[in-house]
Amino acid sequence: MAEIGHGGKEIKERIFDPSKAREKIKGLTEIPVRKQIANEIIDLAYGFFSPLEGFMGKADVDGVVKNMRLADGTIWPIPILFDLSEKEVADYGVESGKSVVLTYQGNPMALFEVDEVFEYDKAAMCKAVFGTDEEKHPGCKRTYEYKDKFIGGKITLVKEPKINEPFGPYFLPPLKMRQIIKEKGWSRTVAHQTRNVPHTGHEWLMKGAFFQAYADLPIEKPEVGVVVNAIIGEKRVKDYIDEAIVLCQDELEKAGYFGPHNHLTSLTFWDMRYAGPKEAIFHAILRTNLGITHHMYGRDHAGVGDYYGAYEAHHLLESVGEELDITPVYSMNWLYCPVCAEITSEGLCNHGDQQQKFSGTLIRSIVTDGVKPPRLIIRPEVFDQIMACADKYGQGSPFVTEEYLEKRSPVFDIEPL
Ligand SMILES: [Zn+2]
């Protein structure tokens, strides 16, 4: 049976049969790609970006910039671009109607059937997607760093990525994820977008969303699963290391705070754009394609600095709600209240001045101290896993350092054909 994804289109994997791959790329010009583009090739080929089948042409970019829609009218908030310099276009002989092979780590990764070579006003793109064209916004910075020519066309993998330890079990592309959801018997699923190791505030966010998602289902058998979908992409110093993010999220299940009957940890390759409301829509699309029915949104979802209002993403989601096949589940911040002696939601109990917010600074100082915190701040098993990941993968730190960036193993490799 066809699996239907975003925009009502069937999700298709674009991957050549290994026995035919070599022949498909024979004699074609090779163009090496950087990691961001390799991530997006994977997303396109496995259907994370369905209905897109390749990098966008000008009509789609124009639609996204002017109306937040692809040329065919399907909602889409962020351009998916392949860039080259004018010199590269000339040197590689890239032109409409010609196929090239994209390589990563020196090995063939994907066939790229070029439809179009075009230019686009980057400042206009920034204003539309990020609401600003300031270079200090990290999404604008990434946009300005694109070279001056964009290439639109379909992508097909010639070699599937080898996902390295410890990430392998968590790479669950749309068709695989949908199959697992069926096997688990979940009639509803709620996505948790994360780039963090979980403190109890995150745990209660997930538990609160779980209750909201099954509110009108029979109590005996809720059949609801929380799907943690970690974003794995560009790392910056002071972020959590990727290994700690996935293993600590999974630890909540392994240690029994959830169970395999209602919890699953997974990952998606994506370099965050920090587009706030637009990225909230984008996350809804990714998780729709994964077969997920509900999506958690907290305050200032995917925001950065003070570019977006705390609930701006919620308003944008509401404005297009009918056209998205996923139900947003909104949440206030969760905090620790020492008077209630429990985790509580903002605005719920009346001990306002005594409540402790889970600020990034607080959690960072706890983790940096290495002294096990109270179990109502970070679960002891999660804390032990953070420390284990620091030793095993982070040269002693669970946070990204220059040393980690230099020495870490790649999350995936493209091996020779
Ligand atoms: Zn209280």
Image (spheres, grey):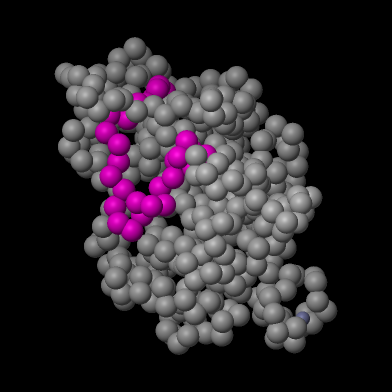
Q: How far across and down, in percent of the image, does residue 62 sit? A: 56, 25
Nearest the viewer among 24 and 150 is 24
Nearest the viewer among 399 and 309 is 399
Q: How far across and down, in percent of the image, does residue 162 sit? A: 28, 45
Residue 359 position (above or below residue 177): below
Nearest the viewer among 398 and 82 is 398
Q: How far across and down, in percent of the image, does residue 343 sit? A: 68, 75
Residue 346 sits in which quadrant?
Answer: bottom right
Residue 386 position (above or below residue 11): below
What residue appears at the point 75 percent right and 56 percent down from the top-left corner?
Answer: 219
Report the magenta residues as a range: 151-178
Whether residue 127 is visible to the viewer of this picture, yes or no, is no
Residue 326 sits in which quadrant?
Answer: top right
Quarter in which the C terminus is drawn: top left
Nearest the viewer among 47 and 36 is 47
Whether residue 317 is visible to the viewer of this picture, yes or no, is yes
Q: Left of 301 or right of it: where is 134?
A: left
Q: Quadrant of ligand 1?
A: bottom right
Q: How far across and down, in percent of the image, does residue 205 sit? A: 65, 63
Label tally: 0
Residue 204 position (above or below residue 295): below
Please tell me whether residue 307 belongs to the stretch shown in magenta. Answer: no
| Residue found at the far top of this picture | 97
Q: Left of 354 or right of it: where is 242?
A: left
Q: Left of 234 or right of it: where is 212?
A: right
What residue appears at the point 57 percent right and 64 percent down from the top-left corner?
Answer: 258
| Residue found at the far right of this picture | 350
Please tell me whether residue 156 belongs to the stretch shown in magenta. Answer: yes
What residue appears at the point 26 percent right and 57 percent down from the top-left corner?
Answer: 409
What residue appears at the point 63 percent right and 30 percent down from the top-left corner?
Answer: 75
